[in-house]
Image (cartoon, rainbow, N blue to C red):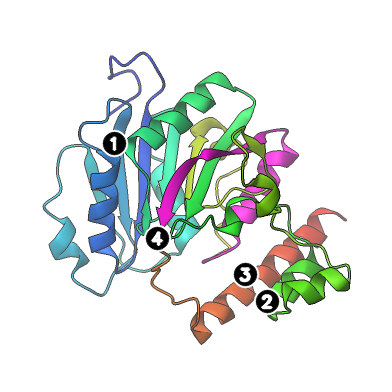
Amino acid sequence: MTQSSSSHPHPMISVVTVNYNTAHHVLRSLETLSVDTHPRIAQAMIIDNASSDDSREQLSHLRGKVQIEWNQHNIGFGRANNQAIEQVESAYVCLVNPDVRLTDKSLTTMAEYLDAHPDVAGVGCAMVSRDGEVAAESFRYEPTKTASIAKYLHVPKGIRRVLGMPDYYMDLDALKDQSEPVAVDILSGACMVMRVEAFREVGGFDPDFFLYWEDTDLSVRLRQKGWALHVLPSVEAIHFKTSSQSRQSLQFWLQFGRSMGLYFKKRSHSST
């Protein structure tokens, strides 16, 4: 479905979700967004990264605005998103992880914010836990190598502060009663609405990042091009954090560490 094929007066949105063994979450996410009835959603593209569970059985029945592509191999998170966004004809794209619950009304609010702010490339929201606690990663500064290594090594926040180490999370206490949009350095790839024009201008996600840090890299390149990135504290999405890699697993930390190293290697090369 193309942008011009809709009679809706505002730019249309394509929803993109990358699935890897999380089909039940994909179904819930699409339901929460009211994909088939939302007037601004042109399509929902699901890229399945060679899931090894019953994802094909659970998702193959989807019709209407939903399109599914089945990859033969797991090509990574960023590359799979690129695969989808290369094909969309809408003006905006909503990137949403399967384990994130973004409501149709919240999506509309985020899209309307882009409508009114042409200098903003992408907009995020406050991601909250099931208990309603706002996740620190919703509001991020550009990470320094020192802050990132300290976090990776689980250096307690109190010690980091005593040693004067910078943090790449904004002060949530200071933002607690904030209702106005917040300019951030980094948008979370778990949930954002972005201008397709801006995404394509910088070449999309760097395919060298298999998983993690690709959103940080993308955000930095967007800001280097003069685009702004904002988060709407008044808009919330529940993040269940039930990704295919447990954050407590060795696999998670190895992949996170590899991507972190790649990010700072690329940043050092780009600044020389």
Q: Which element carries disc 1, helix, strand or loop? A: strand
Residue holding disc 2: 152
Give the number of the mark in front: 4 or 2: 4
Q: Earlier in the sequence, mark 4 or mark 3?
A: 4
| Residue 152 rendering spot, x and y as whole percentages | 67, 76
Q: Which mark is residue 168?
A: none
Q: Which element carries disc 2, helix, strand or loop? A: helix
**Is residue 140 shown to the viewer in this render?**
no
Q: CA distance from mark 3 to mark 2?
A: 12 Å
Residue holding disc 1: 43
Q: Earlier in the sequence, mark 2 or mark 1?
A: 1
Q: Amino acid at mark 2?
A: Tyr
Give the number of the mark in front: 2 or 1: 2
| Residue 245 rendering spot, x and y as whole percentages | 43, 75
Residue holding disc 3: 259
Q: Amino acid at mark 4?
A: Arg
Q: Earlier in the sequence, mark 3 or mark 2?
A: 2
Whether tag 1 and tag 4 are in contact, CB under 8 A, the answer is no
Q: CA distance from mark 3 to mark 1?
A: 31 Å
Residue holding disc 4: 130
